[in-house]
């Protein structure tokens, strides 16, 4: 009989029962990750929780034909019920090269042992936006350096890491490729499992990293390339209630900054300038508020800022410091109003389905904005819903969230092999129809 080579990884955690083994196995079979008949078997992951299984038991349950050759690598064994999981995460989907080490200990708050970010703001500054080719090259240059520093700062070596998680999409494809190739090299060289992570899942699961938030919760994911309301049912199950039909708010902040001559990234500079401004000085639109759903639009708002600036320049002969601050305040207020009102609608839908212990979280770069955070917290209070906004450093792109999302997948017994591919587009909710214009700028969608 033809030999079957397989690599069985057993992940033991004290939470669920043996009943999950078979469905898990079936899932892998259905996904055609292995094929006993042809003898082509690469990797099987069993998630065995709550018991101390014997390898023989798993062997029996797996249905592997007797007499085949087994090369097994056990990275956790039966007696380890509380073994912490330590994962190295890599992020490179846009203009931040990042690596982080995160440790998960069952029943405890996860710990970020290190988080290194090499931003590329200076490289793109003269172009007024992220240049994909420049970004990809910088990632390829900087990622291994980030990994080295992340390991050093966590005082760990690769031998002490349980798996490598990497953003496999969505994002600028050159950057995602640089990250995936780097992670594959590390995984192949060290023999560690490889976990491909959806960048959006990284953002959406951050409230669990920071606050141990229980499922299901509502999250507003609002960043430079995305804006959507999601009900997060599990690390792999998301339901989109609505989102932007054109630009993302972060993109609108960046363009507003450019229009007003403020530095990139636009979010922090517009927020800072807005502090000295009067939002009532300009009347800017609140698009799509007349629609009863959770969809949003921000491209018209950006155009309105452009018109207001041009009118100001032609009437006053230039843009004064105060006029710029007022426009920033008016823009920020319009974005805040739209996000707050659409959050009310999303909360209504979420609450109708999940009335017990409801929680609303915000994630993504724009969630670093204190006016927006405060408004969303107020809306949550109106509905009697708990509110979580991760610290600003975990709202913008980082690798700790990728390591954490990797931990979440790994705990479910999921991992990838070296055929993992980089994906420019990768919606979290695959059942809902693709949104019109969603991510049309191609930045990250
Ligand atoms: P991300 O796409 O998650 O990396 O987030 C980056 C985006 O968040 C950029 O478009 C930034 O302009 C935006 N951003 C970062 N900080 C802020 C802020 N304080 N206010 C508004 N937008 C922000
Ligand atoms: Mg992001």
Image (tube, rainbow, N blue to C red):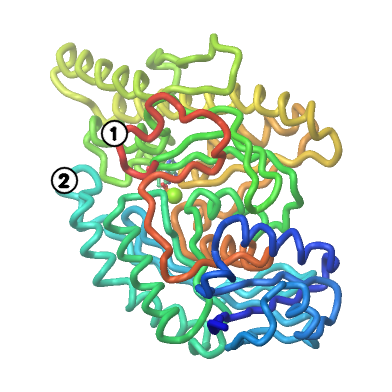
Residue 57 appearing in the image = yes
Q: Residue 346 vs residue 37: left or right?
A: right
**CB atoms of marks 1 and 2 within 8 Å:** no
- Residue 317: percent from left, percent from top: 13, 18
Badge 2 marks a residue whose secondary structure is helix
> Relative to 420, does residue 430 appear above or below in the rendering?
above
Task: Kindly identify which residue carries mark 2.
Answer: 127
**Quarter-of-image position of residue 175:** bottom left
Q: Residue at x 16, y 45 (%)?
A: 127
Task: Kindly identify which residue carries mark 1.
Answer: 255
Q: Residues within 10 Å of mark 2 (few under 14, many from 20)?
A: few
Badge 1 marks a residue whose secondary structure is helix
**Quarter-of-image position of residue 217:** top right
Q: Residue at x 61, y 37 (%)?
A: 230
Q: Quadrant of the C terminus?
A: top left
> Relative to 360, does residue 116 appear above or below in the rendering?
below
- The span from disc 1 to disc 2 (Cα, nearest Å) is 12 Å
**Quarter-of-image position of residue 258:** top left
Q: Nearer the viewer, residue 309 or 136?
A: 136
Q: Earlier in the sequence, mark 1 or mark 2?
A: 2
Q: Quadrant of the N terminus?
A: bottom right
> Relative to 55, does residue 434 appear above or below in the rendering?
above
Q: Nearer the viewer, residue 218 or 174?
A: 174
Q: Residue 111 vs residue 54: left or right?
A: left
């Amino acid at each position: 009989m033809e030999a079957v080579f397989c690599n069985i990884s057993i992940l033991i955690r004290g939470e669920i029962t043996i009943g999950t083994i078979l469905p898990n196995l079936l899932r892998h079979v259905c996904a055609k990750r292995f094929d006993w008949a042809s003898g082509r078997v690469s990797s099987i992951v069993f998630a065995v929780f709550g018991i101390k299984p014997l390898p023989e038991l798993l062997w029996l349950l797996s249905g592997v034909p007797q007499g085949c050759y087994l090369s097994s690598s056990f990275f956790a064994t039966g007696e380890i019920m509380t073994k912490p999981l330590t994962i190295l995460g890599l992020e490179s989907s846009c203009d931040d090269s990042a690596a982080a080490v995160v440790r998960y200990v069952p029943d405890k708050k996860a710990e970020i042992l290190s988080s290194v970010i090499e931003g590329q703001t200076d490289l793109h500054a003269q172009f007024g936006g992220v240049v994909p080719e420049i970004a990809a090259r910088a990632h390829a240059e900087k990622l291994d350096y980030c990994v080295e520093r992340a390991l050093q700062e966590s005082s760990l070596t690769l031998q002490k890491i349980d798996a490598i998680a990497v953003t496999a999409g969505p994002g600028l494809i050159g950057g995602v490729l640089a990250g995936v190739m780097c992670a594959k090299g590390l995984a192949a060289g060290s023999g560690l499992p490889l976990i491909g992570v959806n960048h959006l899942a990284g953002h959406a699961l951050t409230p669990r990293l920071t606050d141990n938030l229980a499922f299901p919760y509502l999250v507003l994911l609002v960043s430079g390339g995305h804006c959507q309301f999601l009900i997060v049912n599990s690390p792999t199950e998301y339901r989109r209630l609505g989102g932007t039909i054109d630009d993302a708010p972060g993109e609108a902040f960046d363009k507003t900054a450019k229009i007003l001559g403020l530095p990139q990234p636009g979010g922090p500079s517009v927020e800072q300038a807005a502090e000295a401004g009067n939002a009532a000085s300009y009347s800017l639109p609140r698009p799509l508020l007349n629609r009863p759903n959770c969809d949003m639009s921000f491209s018209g708002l950006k155009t309105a800022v452009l018109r207001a600036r041009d009118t100001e320049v032609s009437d006053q002969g230039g843009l004064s410091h105060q006029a710029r601050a007022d426009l920033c305040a008016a823009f920020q207020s319009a974005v805040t109003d739209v996000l707050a009102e659409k959050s009310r609608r999303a909360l209504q839908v979420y609450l109708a389905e999940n009335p017990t212990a409801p929680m609303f979280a915000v994630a993504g770069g724009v969630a670093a904005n204190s006016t927006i955070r405060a408004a969303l917290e107020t809306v949550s209070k109106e509905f009697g819903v708990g509110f979580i906004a991760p610290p600003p450093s975990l709202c913008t792109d980082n690798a700790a969230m990728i390591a954490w999302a990797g931990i979440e997948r790994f705990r479910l017994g999921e991992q990838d092999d070296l055929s993992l591919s980089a994906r420019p587009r990768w919606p979290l909710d695959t059942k809902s129809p693709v949104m019109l214009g969603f991510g049309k700028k191609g930045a990250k969608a």
